[in-house]
Image (cartoon, grey):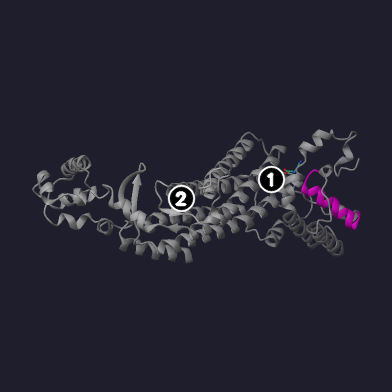
Amino acid sequence: MSKLWGGRFTKDTNKLVEQETASISFDQKLANEDIQGSIAHVKMLSTTGTVSEEEALTIIDGLKSVQKKLEQGALTYSIEHEDIHMNIEKFLIDEIGPLGGKLHTGRSRNDQVATDMHLYLKKHTEEIIELVHATQSAILKISSDHVDTILPGYTHLQRAQPISFAHHLLAYFWMLQRDKERFIDSLKRTSGSPLGAGALAGTTFPINRHQVADELGFDYVYPNSMDAVSDRDFILEFMSAASIMMMHISRLSEELVIWSSQEFQFIELDDSFCTGSSIMPQKKNPDVPELLRAKTGRVYGNLIGLLTVLKGLPLAYNKDMQEDKEGMFDTVETLEASLMMLAPMIETMNVKKENMKQAVSEDYSNATDIADYLVTKGVPFRQSHEIIGKIVLYGIDNGKYLLDLSIEEYKKFSDFFEEDIYDVLAPEQVVANRRSYGGTSQDQVREQLKLAKKTLSS
Ligand code: ARG
C-alpha cells in the first residue's frame, strides 16, 4: 500500500476509480505554485519551532531540486499519487528521505490546493491586465490615425448616422477599460491567503498564517478557516470578468468579420491573420476574429460549469471542488491567447478609408441633420421628422440622395428650406456638428483621445 494516505485502507483502489479521481493530468500546471506554497509553509514551521532550522533548509533544498528536475522533465507524475500535492510530496520524500514527510505538518491538501489556485490566478490576472492594456494601446494607436475617417454608424445594422472611425474604435477602448478595472478589482479577493486553514478547522500547531501570507505576497489572511478552504468565488469573479470581456471581444470580432466582407470592404485583415480555403482559391477567411467570437462560448461555459459545481456543496471541502481547475486554466489560456492575437490583428489591418467615405455618400444617414436643420428654423422636431421622412421617400423613388436634391425640390416640402441646407449635409459636416460631450465630432473625438491616453497611462 504505497498511497500517502494508505494507512487506513486494506484494499487497493479500483483502477478506473484511481484514473478518474486523479487530477494530476491537469493540476500539474500548479507545480510551481505548489512548491512556492510549500517553501513558505516550511519556513514558517521553522520560525514557529515545529521543525528545526536545519530540517527546514533540507526540505527547501529538496523542493528546489524537485522543481529543477520537473523543469528538466526528469520526473514522471503518477496517477497513483492522485494530484500535484501528493506527487510533489512523494518526489520530495524520494529526494531527501522520510524527513520530507514533515512538510505536511499543520496543513491539509484543502488549504494547500486553495493556496495554489490563489497564487496561480493572481499571477495570471496580473498578466491578463497587462495584455488588456496592450490591446487598448493598439486601439488607441489606430484610432489616432482615423479621427477624420468617416463611415456609416449603424443601429439595427441599418445605416444610421455618419461617425468618425476613431469614435467607433474608441468605444471598444472604454469597454476594455472597464474589463481591466474588473480584473484589477478582482485581485483584491484573489490576494487572500487560505494557507493554515488546515482541512477545515485550523490546526493544533503553533503556525503563523500572516508570515506565510507575507512570504507569498498575499495582502491578507482569510479570517475563517472554513471559508478559506471552501471559497472558490475568487475564481468565479475572474470567470465573470472574463466572460464580459470575451463578449466585448466577440462583438469587435463580429464587426471585423462584417467589415472585411466583400459587401462592406471597410477593412482588410493582414494575410498573417487569415487563412485560405482548401477548395476555393479566391478565399481569404477572417478565421482569427471568427475564432475569437466562438471562444467566448467556452469562457461562458466554464463560468456556468463552476457555478453549477459549487451551488449545492455543503461546507467545507468536497471532492466536487477538484472540478474547478480545468475551467480556470482554460479560461486563463483562452483569454491570454485571444488578447495576444487581437492587438496585432488590429494594428496590422488595412483601413479602406475611401470605401467608408463612399458608403456615407451613398445613403440617407444625413437625414437626422435636415430634421435638426428645420428645428433650428423653428419647426417642432416631430413635425420636421415627418417632413424629412417624406423627402427620403421622394429621394428613394427618384434615385437621388439628400445632397442631390435641388433647393426647389426641398421647398416643395417646406418653405423653411434655404440654400444653407447644403452646408449641413456633407458627411464631414454631419460628423463635425455632433459636438455634444462624448459625441462623434472630430473635436470631441480628439478630446476623447486625450482622455483615453491619460486613462491608459494612469
Ligand atoms: N486534488 C484535490 C483538488 O483538486 C486536492 C484536494 C484534495 N483534498 C481532499 N480532501 N481529498 O481538489
Q: Looking at the picture, which amino acid does disc 2 mark?
A: Leu
Q: Position of residue 86 (x, y in %)?
A: 81, 48
Q: Is residue 92 magenta?
A: yes
User: Going 21% across and 46% down the picture, which residue do you hit?
Assistant: 400
To which quarter of the image does residue 381 belong?
A: top left
To which quarter of the image does residue 124 belong?
A: bottom right
**Mark 1 crowd level (few <14, some 14–19, many ≥20, 10 Å Cα):** many
Q: Position of residue 353 (x, y in %)?
A: 37, 58
Tell which tag, 1 or 2, sits nearer the viewer: 2
The quadrant of the image that shows the N terminus is: top right
* Residue of label 1: 229
Q: Position of residue 315 (x, y in %)?
A: 67, 38
Q: Residue furthest left?
A: 415
| Residue 184 visible in this rendered orientation of the protein | no
**What range is drawn magenta here?**
82-97
* Contact (Cβ within 8 Å) of mark 1 with mark 2: no
* Residue of label 2: 256
Q: Is residue 307 left or right of residue 85?
A: left
Q: Position of residue 16 (x, y in %)?
A: 81, 33
Q: Is mark 2 within 8 Å of ligand 1?
A: no
- Asked if residue 45 is positioned above or below residue 250 in the image, the reply reads below
| Residue 56 visible in this rendered orientation of the protein | yes
Q: How many marks?
A: 2
Front residue of 371 and 157: 157
Secondary structure mostly taken by the magenta-highlighted segment of the chain:
helix
Q: Is residue 298 left or right of residue 315?
A: left
**Mark 2 crowd level (few <14, some 14–19, many ≥20, 10 Å Cα):** many
